Amino acid sequence: MTVNSLENPVMRTIFLVVFVLGLSGPVSLQAQNTMTINADQPRNKISRHIYGQFSEHLGTGVYGGLWVGKDSDIPNTDGFRNDVVEALKELEIPNLRWPGGCFADEYHWRDGIGPQEDRPTRINTHWGMVEEKNEVGTHEFMRLTELLDTEPYISANVGSGTVQEMASWVEYMTYNGTSTLANLRRENGQEKAWEVKFWGIGNESWGCGGNMQADYYADLYRRYATFAKDYSGNELYKIASGFSDDNYDWTETVVKNAGRMMDAISLHYYTIPTGNWGQKGPSMNFEEEMYFSGLRQGLKMDEYVSRHSAIMDQYDPEKRIALAVDEWGIWTDPLPGSNPGFLQQQNSIRDALIASTTLDILNKHSDRVRIANIAQTVNVLQAMILTEGPEMLKTPTYHVFDFYTVHHDAMLLPLHIETEDYSHGGESIPSISATASKDKTGAVHLTVTNLHATEDKEVSLNIRGMDVETAGEGRILTADAVDAVNTFDNPDRVSPGPFDNYTLEGNQLILRLPSKSVIVIRIE
Ligand code: AHR
């Protein structure tokens, strides 16, 4: 019914009768969005490592955002700010990737050990040509992983480092016996060898990591992987540098030639709202067009993961090798007035929904995707936390990661979703995205996103294979505008609240989601 037809009194009366009857019961609204799960047929574990984070020496991501130094007025533990560490701990971060990114391929680990005052100053050539004083090195980073109770993911230098340099770093960190390098670690304060599992061999080796070609990199990977040894019971999980977006040839060549020596190969995909790297689009003060195109671009992750996986299936049908989506997230134009090399951007409800829908895609493909890292944890790109001097705030994306902790290491329940389209400017995307999983206690958790900018959506979930008794612990994240962000003046504009707009009848759960929202709910 159009607005014009309501100007006709007869039509208006018919509309009112239908509307009132609808409210009072006899005419029930049919949910156009339906989902079905078989709770007794879980598929595979959703590795918690899909919820990894990434902290590069880039802008204020590490310096200022995480590290303030022991002498700072900002309360800190061994140099890391307490407020940020405390907030991040709530996300139960499974692994933290460091020190890059592009920075990794110009990072020489010996620069970052020993007394702080003796460490050299280098130039961070990728990110703003700023001084890198190496205050945060191996020992500091490993302390951070302890504070966050997370596993390190070390991204090693292949582009400008030698095989010996990388091999020595492994020995320095993980060898528990007596050797000159292990003793040096002890002299520097760490008696016991660290446990380090995730070991990246090069980053974007086709680009900032050395501009290599696939054949060459595959050979180089084999060489570096040969000398990345397992010491003292530590077992490295070796991750090869994969490609971005849709370069399937790289994946094919590297998996074919070096697959037997790797545990995972990476995939990077950044959501560029306009689809144009030269002019990516703003991170704040935008309208529905930019909201919609951001979400649409984000959903392309599904195609990239599917196609890279299909290539891997040819060489690794048993799925031994994981796809490590170790850089993803929205990348917008830098904030006006900021150093363009610092990749500072705001974080809106749109970005939160890009996070929830991307995590749904990664969960769906969790038989192949077993590690992923959003870029980046603090102050850079799609951050969880923004800081300004002593202040910090949680972004809308932070809250999505908080909601999704329920899926860490839970069993994926494949979802059959029938959803209405959300159309804008001649393009369409699905209105609804979701993940369902079953945890160790048998409880089912559901996260559902309504992507539509203006329409509330009713979603009906049919739950098979379990006797449902209760649904509860609902939480919702939504906002009053498509570009709503949290600022230091208004840090809780986009923050979670309780969600109780649902009804449970037998094994059917009807959810009513406001526009641009994501919810989490527990079903038992
Ligand atoms: O996350 C920012 C940069 O994006 C990383 O350093 C690089 O790997 C990618 O191009």
Image (tube, grey):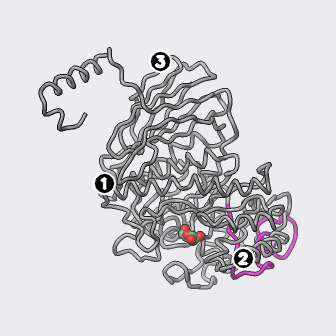
**Along the line of sight, the residue nearer the viewer: 53 or 184:** 53
Label 3 to label 1: alpha-carbon separation:
39 Å
Mark 3 closeness class: few <14, some 14–19, many ≥20 residues within 10 Å: few
Quadrant of res 420: top left
The answer to whether any part of residue 275 appears in the image is yes
**Along the line of sight, the residue nearer the viewer: 338 or 295:** 295
| Residue 156 on the magenta span | yes
Do the CB atoms of the residues marked 3 and 1 lie less than 8 Å apart? Answer: no
Label 2 to label 1: alpha-carbon separation:
44 Å
The structure residue drawn at horizontal position 67% and vertical position 74%, both measured from the top left corner, is: 205
Mark 1 closeness class: few <14, some 14–19, many ≥20 residues within 10 Å: few
Q: Nearer the viewer, mark 3 or mark 1?
A: 3
Q: Nearer the viewer, mark 3 or mark 2?
A: 3
Query: Which residue is label 2 attached to?
Result: 158
Circle 2: element type: loop
Q: Whole-percent x and y of residue 50?
A: 62, 51
Query: Which residue is label 3 attached to?
Result: 505
Q: Please tell me in which quarter of the rendered image ligand 1 is found.
A: bottom right
Mark on residue 490? 1
Return the disc, 2 or 1, that comes first in the chain's sequence. Answer: 2
Circle 3: element type: strand
- Dot 2 beta carbon under 8 Å from ligand 1: no
Label 3 to label 2: alpha-carbon separation:
58 Å
Q: Which residues are magenta?
A: 153-181
Residue 45 higher or lower than 186, as above or below: above
